[in-house]
Image: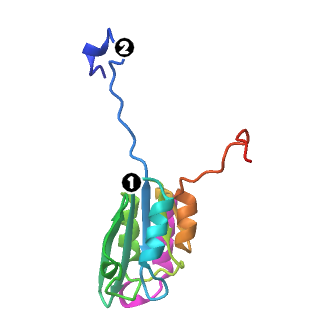
Amino acid sequence: MVRYLHRWLMDGAVFRRRARKRGGTILVDGTGSMSLEADALDRLLLATLPGTRVAVYSGSEDRGTLRIVAEGSRRAAAEHLKTPGRDNIVDLPALEWLARQPQPRVWVTDGGVTGIGDRPSSVLSARCGALRRRARIQRVAKLDQAAALLGTRAAAPAWVCRS
């Protein structure tokens, strides 16, 4: 779309382009078998692209919580990284949230999927698996692996001389 017609004589840049927001989204399973430490989150934010959003989730009994704990270079205070529950009961709603977030999408979890009462279900596991495939959600077991997937630090080109 022609947006800057006044630039025609200067440089001919009359069209507007939408810039793609860099980053991605990381969803962390914050249940009893997993944990999110402040120093690990800081390392993750330093290693990933600008604009990366990080959320943590867990539940207890029949309620779940999903918190956005970091975005870009900012993160929540250490006391807000802990989730109130220790159960997985909101895996599917958390994955549905992740599916609506910017790509690339990474889910940091041990792979256990449960519903109300923290009971596993083959139907629920199948629904989570289908959602992961449809939304292109990659699953990893540790934050370090998520940083490697979304990391900005690439190897130096072969033509760079090192002394």
As helix, strand or loop, the secondary structure at mark 1 comes to: loop
x, y (%) of residue 51?
A: 38, 54
State left or right for residue 45 relative to residue 140: left
x, y (%) of residue 45?
A: 44, 63
As helix, strand or loop, the secondary structure at mark 2 comes to: loop
Return the residue at label 2: 12
Q: Earlier in the sequence, mark 2 or mark 1?
A: 2
The residue drawn where x is 44% and y is 69% is 42
The Cα atoms of the two marked residues, 2 and 1, are separated by: 31 Å
Is residue 129 magenta-colored? yes
Is residue 120 magenta-colored? yes
**Position of 133 relative to 116 (above/below):** above
State whether the magenta stretch is mostly helix, strand or loop: helix
Q: Residues within 10 Å of mark 1 (few under 14, many from 20)?
A: some
Which residue sits furthest top? 9
> In the image shown, does 19 or 9 lie closer to the viewer?
9
- Three-letter code for the amino acid on which mark 1 is drawn: Gly
Which quadrant is home to the N terminus? top left
Question: What span is colored magenta in the figure?
Answer: 115-133
